[in-house]
Amino acid sequence: MLLALVTGLLAVALLYLVALGAGRLDSRIGRMRGGFRPGPRIPPFNVIDSHGVQHSCPSGTSHQILLFVHHAVRSFPTVTTAIEAIRDRDLRLEVLLFTISAANITQAALDGIGLSVPVIVVQERFYTRYRVRQMPYCIIADADGRLLSSGNASSGDHLLTLWRRACAQEKDHSSIAEFAPTASAS
């Protein structure tokens, strides 16, 4: 009887600790600590998109917006507007969309909202490698793979804020600092 009581209490304590940890990861603090801090290079990659085109980071030629999403990307229409506004100003910018969903489902969702970007299907460990804790999540890197900004991109305002931070990081580099939008795309 005593053994059953102790076992039960241990199980409850263990469940509490697991729930506490999961809650911390999904809390505002956990989301803020996700990703990387600006400055260092992000982990490099060489990937092939759904059309067979190879992409890598560092790109060596252009800044990159790495957007981590799933097929529910069309639930975030203002993100599309913000991407188009940024891309219209910097034609050298490469936008890559990473997903763990099937490429055809994600591509259909993108087609539905009129966004034309490469779709790259990756394993969950790729998200872990880039410390993605929520979606959509955005990483902005320069041509050398240096992290300029990262964070939640669930609205056009969020994405434009990340872009402004990237511009601030690159204030000495005219290639990105030319465009620091002041109006939101929401």
Image (tube, helix red, strand yellow):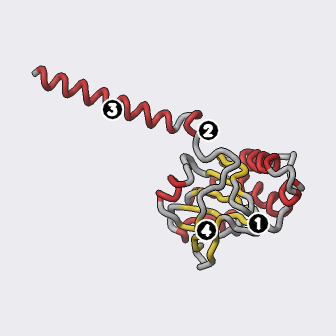
Q: Which amino acid type corresponds to the residue marked 3 in the rendered image? A: Leu
Is residue 101 found left or right of 162 in the rendered image?
Answer: left
Q: Which mark, residue 62?
A: 1
Residue 17 in the image, given as x and y percentages of width and height = 37, 30
Q: Quadrant of residue 65?
A: bottom right
Q: Calculate the distance from the C-alpha at mark 4 to the C-alpha at mark 3.
A: 38 Å
Q: Nearer the viewer, residue 97 or 144?
A: 144
Is residue 50 found left or right of 85 in the rendered image?
Answer: left
Q: Calculate the distance from the C-alpha at mark 1 to the C-alpha at mark 3.
A: 47 Å
- Front: mark 1 or 3: 1
- Kindly identify which residue carries mark 3: 15
- The earlier-in-sequence mark between 4 and 3 is 3
Q: Calculate the distance from the C-alpha at mark 4 to the C-alpha at mark 1.
A: 18 Å
Q: Which amino acid type corresponds to the residue marked 2 in the rendered image? A: Met
- The earlier-in-sequence mark between 2 and 1 is 2
- Front: mark 3 or 2: 2
CB under 8 Å between callouts 2 and 1?
no
Badge 3 density bin: few <14, some 14–19, many ≥20, Cα 10 Å? few
Q: Nearer the viewer, residue 16 or 125?
A: 125
Q: Which mark, residue 32?
A: 2
SS under mark 3: helix
Q: Is residue 41 above or below residue 158?
A: below
- The earlier-in-sequence mark between 1 and 3 is 3
- Front: mark 2 or 1: 1
Residue 158 in the image, given as x and y percentages of width and height = 72, 45
- The earlier-in-sequence mark between 4 and 1 is 1
Q: Calculate the distance from the C-alpha at mark 3 to the C-alpha at mark 2.
A: 25 Å
Residue 16 in the image, given as x and y percentages of width and height = 36, 29
Q: Nearer the viewer, residue 32 or 99?
A: 32
- Kindly identify which residue carries mark 4: 119
Badge 4 density bin: few <14, some 14–19, many ≥20, Cα 10 Å? many
